[in-house]
Amino acid sequence: MDIEKTTKWEKAVVQILNLDGWQLKHIGGKSRYDAKGLTPKGFMAVIEMKFRNKYYENKMIEKKKYDALMNLPGDVVKLYFVADPKGNYLYWLNNMTLPPIETVLASKTTYWGGDKESKEVYYLPESKASVVSVNDNDPEPGPWTEYFNNRKKSK
């Protein structure tokens, strides 16, 4: 997924959460998080977001991104949002017990393939997500089917 599309998705998530009483602003760019603002209860919050074209049962977060979030002041709510073809997952990171660190060979950048590097990551199980919305398996093609089919054809 390219940076322009990712930015649109991030902004859409911010708008949807704001409809539910959040007061967030999209940050994007080279920041360690994609949105910041207030929760519906008025607590300061930051959200790191990932949009995956492929489903993985455990959701990967890079250790350096996690560490950067956790280095923010303790009263800031640190959230990790993952969207994939099977659903949306929101993790409250502040008090989460993490699984062991793993080292993987991964792309140097999020937006394009190419060079790989060794990265330390955590694989968060779906069961640790505080909010989960699972996409129903509908006999009719869902709204994302056409989008992902077109993406495959254009490659």
Image (cartoon, rainbow, N blue to C red):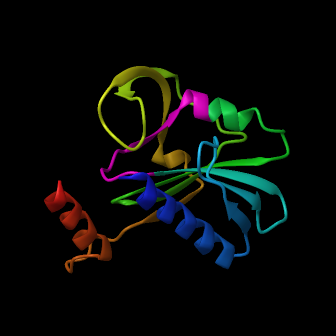
Question: What residue do we see at 52% from left, 23% from top?
Answer: 100
Asked whether 109 falls inside the magenta stretch, the response is: no
Front residue of this view, candidates 46 and 58: 46
Residue 5 in the image, given as x and y percentages of width and height: 42, 61
Residue 150 in the image, given as x and y percentages of width and height: 20, 66
Furthest residue toward left:
153
The magenta-colored residue range is: 51-65
- Residue 137's image quarter? bottom left
Residue 28 in the image, given as x and y percentages of width and height: 60, 52
As drawn, 10 above or below 72: below
As drawn, 121 above or below 46: above
Question: What residue do we see at 76% from left, 63% from top?
Answer: 39
Front residue of this view, candidates 42 and 7: 7
In the visual, does 50 lie left or right of 155?
A: right
Front residue of this view, candidates 88 and 69: 69
- Residue 151's image quarter? bottom left
Asked whether 61 falls inside the magenta stretch, the response is: yes
As drawn, 20 above or below 13: below
